[in-house]
Structures are given as C-alpha cells and as structure tokens.
Amino acid sequence: QVQLVESGGGLVQPGGSLRLSCAASGSGLIIAYMGWHRQAPGKQREPVANMVSGGYTNYADSVKGRFTVSRDNAKNTVYLQMNTLKPEDTAVYYCNVRAGTDAWSMRDYWGQGTQVTVSS
C-alpha cells in the first residue's frame, strides 16, 4: 500500500555534509511517524532521528547538534540533513514510516536503505 523511495547517500570526507530524502507514496495516506535508522558494519540497526505527526523530534545522542530531521507534509517526505560527518557515521541508513489510510490500519514500512560512507 505504501512505497518508500530513499536517496541522497554517497561518499563524503570527514566534516562534510549529506542530505537524505525519503518519500512515501500512497492514496489517502495518513503518516504518524517518519524517521531514520542506521546500521553500521558489525553493529545492530539503531535509531538516528525521527519526527512524529505533532512535530516532535528525537535524536540519538551521537548525532545531536550535527543531524537535523525535517518533513514536508505536502510531499510526504522526510529529510535527514547530516553535517560535520564523522567516520563513525558510516552505515546504511534506512527510512522508516508508520502510515495507513486511517488510525486503525497503521503499519510500519521500511525503505531499501542508502549507503553513507565517511572516509578520506
């Protein structure tokens, strides 16, 4: 019912910036949550940042002050602006969305993942 398209990953030097995008598509869509997780080599997937419908945001301690999550409601798109990137930010970043046609049909969806590599 819901399709997610991620983009924006790539290779960047330490201190550089990237912006990830995730667009959700579907008719009559209500989105309760949009956010980002990441999975680094040899580590478990962890939450990075998210925004709920009321505009409240959450950030992992490791990215506070460097990453910013934002949302374009008209486009059903969530963004992750990543500044001052560090090698430890290297991971596959996954968009995740909780959405449905009404409050009783909400389900979780995941994007395909986009690789972010921070290296000299």
Image (cartoon, grey):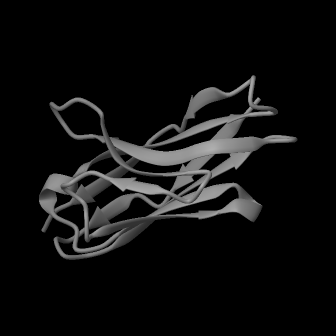
Q: Is residue 18 left or right of residue 4?
A: left
Q: In this view of the protein, which residue sits in the foreground, 95 or 68?
A: 68
The structure residue drawn at horizontal position 51% and vertical position 37%, both measured from the top left corner, is: 112
Q: Position of residue 60 (x, y in %)?
A: 27, 51
Q: Is residue 2 left or right of residue 45?
A: right
Q: Position of residue 16 (x, y in %)?
A: 25, 76
Q: Position of residue 80 (x, y in %)?
A: 44, 62
Q: In this view of the protein, which residue sits in the foreground, 34 or 5?
A: 34
Relative height, residue 88 to residue 41 (above, below): below
Residue furthest toward the right? 28
Q: Quadrant of the N terminus?
A: top right
The structure residue drawn at horizontal position 63% and vertical position 42%, both measured from the top left corner, is: 32
The image shows a total of numbered marks equal to 0
Relative height, residue 55 to residue 113 (above, below): below
Q: Is residue 97 left or right of residue 31?
A: left
Q: Position of residue 20 (x, y in %)?
A: 46, 60
Q: Quadrant of residue 85?
A: bottom left
Relative height, residue 66 to residue 98 (above, below): below
The structure residue drawn at horizontal position 60% and vertical position 55%, both measured from the top left corner, is: 54
The structure residue drawn at horizontal position 14% and vertical position 54%, both measured from the top left corner, is: 88
Q: Quadrant of the C terminus?
A: bottom left
